[in-house]
Image (cartoon, rainbow, N blue to C red):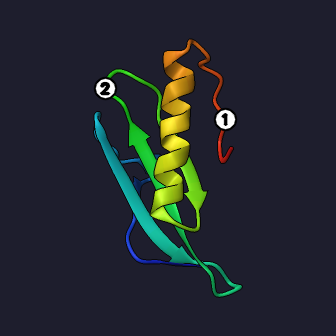
Amino acid sequence: METTTSINHGGCSTCQPGHENYATFKHPNGRTFYQYHYLPSGGDLFSCVSPTLDECRKQRDAWLARQAAGNSKTNFNS
């Protein structure tokens, strides 16, 4: 898989609190995907992979809503 940039260093996310990081990569089938990280201030890291940045952000927003509702269950790519 070809990656345009890295959002990890030594296997750990480089995302700073209150910010998002993302990178694109090309899957062997030719499709481009986004690897996305978001780290809320004082919270857990959200991470997903989706075909569009907009879809990543929608998943992040749904995750944040679940966090605010008291459901801290980690749910990747849902």
Tally the numbered discs: 2
The vertical placement of 9 against 72, above or below, is: below
Q: Is residue 64 left or right of residue 28?
A: left
Q: Position of residue 11 (x, y in %)?
A: 49, 51
Please state which amino acid type lies under the numbered disc 2: Ser
Hey, which residue is sitting farthest bottom in the picture?
Answer: 30
Residue type at mark 1? Asn
Q: Secondary structure at mark 1?
A: loop
Residue under pointer 1:
75
* Occupied quadrant, residue 38: top left
Q: Earlier in the sequence, mark 1 or mark 2?
A: 2
The image shows residue 76 at horizontal and vertical percentages of 65, 42
User: Which residue does the numbered mark 2 point to in the structure image?
Assistant: 41
Q: Is residue 11 visible in this depiction of the protein?
A: no
Report the residue at 49% width, 41% height from top.
60
- Above-or-below relation of 76 to 29: above
* Viewport quadrant of the N terminus: bottom right
- x and y percentages locating residue 50 in the rendered image: 59, 61
Percent coordinates x, y for residue 68 in the rendering? 48, 17
